[in-house]
Image (tube, rainbow, N blue to C red):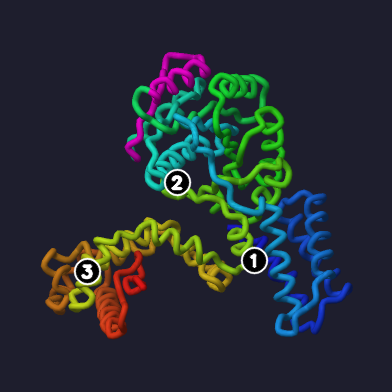
Amino acid sequence: MFENLSEKLDSALKTLKGEGRISEINVATTIKEIRRALVDADVNYKIAKEFTDKVKDTAMGEKVITSVSPGQLMVKIVKDELAQLMGGKATDIDLSGKPSVILIAGLQGSGKTTFSGKLANYLKSKRSKKPLLVAADIYRPAAIDQLKVLGEQIKVEVYSEPENKNAVQIAQNAIEQAKQNGNNVVIIDTAGRLAIDELMMAEVANVKAAVNPHEILFVVDSMTGQDAVNTAKAFNDRLNFSGVVLTKLDGDTRGGAALSISYVVEKPIKFVSMGEKLDTLDVFHPERMAQRILGMGDITTLVERAQAQYDEAQAKKLEKKIRSNKFDFDDFKEQLNQIKKMGNIKDLLAMIPGVGKAIKDIDISDDAFKGIEAMINSMTPFERANPEVIDVSRRKRIAKGAGKDVNEVNAFMKQFEQMKQMMAQMNKFKGMGPGMPGMPMMGRR
């Protein structure tokens, strides 16, 4: 995510390394490179220039603390200004209605329907809401089917009227049903087009007028860069939407849309979506994104994702097994499953300060754990619960069942034993309790 931009900004900020103080000359050189990096990232030149002018004014007005290098100071200034450019702070969605009505708008192919499912899942699992999904795309039959499939996956009801070609009426009927069924959030997925046209704009404007939504979220494919910003402006001029959703952020190496869109339409980015899985939706935090762009990591989001998978009862059970040195392959597999639920592996690692730059050229597949899981699945239930019984002959059978070489099984078994020894050593410290996914010994205080 934003690899090209991160690399170029890092290169630009290196020009201040070793400088004893900030001067007009070394700042001018850095500013020029930052501006070039932003333009290369598909940020409008005017926005890039205004941004770098602010950075320059702030830098030249700062008194450099003797313990802080000019490079470090400039990084902080750029980080703060990037956060402001992207909206300054996270903005929550309005859930005050009874029910709260959320209208989803955007072009076809932007990920609108998938986002509707993700939002319903987020509201149900993290905000304890009872959402109703509404299929109001009357032109694309596949959109109705897609929404129903998503609804089944997350166990959320989907309201549709396949034979009705009146989107306004469908939305109004859905809200009435929500009131009767006790749904406290209604998410209306509207029709999109391949390009902006008057029919689409008029229809979504009519739906807005009829249902008076508490939120209008504009969904945009972040990979379309400056085009996304232009489309957002056209929609905002007509709908006056309340927030932006950036989809496919994991495939965006430039970052132009994320950096520009909030500034242009003067509306906050409320959510960012990565991947197809229905739990890959995050509230947008401008400061955290600025940190990630500058290679500073995002430990806060990493911890939040881990905590989302934290199960106290399970953690206590795991702690007891670790303390008695009975941590087995079933426990290990469960920890792997919880890590996988946290999101893309490379994306998770990039949240650790300094790691993102080190792994940018390394291909880390989401299937990285498949080989390990195959070996564990090739064990019998008795073997998984009693790792010490796995002798040479059993290892050969496990290797054959997993489609692996026996040396790979031996290496895995050795690593597993080393991990158990490390856990045993850590258990000697006081206060160690059950931990979060993938971090068994990170515990309570």
- Identity of the residue drawn at 66% across and 54% down: 88
Q: Is 171 colored magenta in this rendering? A: yes
Instruction: Identify the residue position indicated by label 1 in the image.
Output: 294
For label 1, the crowd category at 10 Å Cα-Cα, with few meaning under 14, some 14 to 19 and many 20 or more, is: many
From the viewer's perspective, is residue 352 above or below residue 150? below
Query: What amino acid is labelled 2 in the image?
Result: Glu
Q: Quadrant of the C terminus?
A: bottom left
Q: CA distance from mark 3 to mark 1?
A: 39 Å
What number is the disc on residue 329? 3
Give whichever of discs 2 and 1 has the lower sequence position: 2
Q: Position of residue 35 (x, y in %)?
A: 79, 60
For label 2, the crowd category at 10 Å Cα-Cα, with few meaning under 14, some 14 to 19 and many 20 or more, is: some
Give, as a single range, the part of the protein colored magenta. 154-179
Q: CA distance from mark 2 to mark 3?
A: 29 Å
Query: What amino acid is labelled 3 in the image?
Result: Phe
Instruction: Identify the residue position indicated by label 2 in the image.
Output: 276
The quarter of the displayed image where residue 30 is located: bottom right
The quarter of the displayed image where residue 431 is located: bottom left
From the viewer's perspective, is residue 260 above or below residue 68? above
CB under 8 Å between discs 2 and 3: no
Looking at the rendered structure, the number of numbered marks drawn on it comes to: 3
- Identity of the residue drawn at 71% across and 36% down: 233
- Identity of the residue drawn at 69% across and 27% down: 238
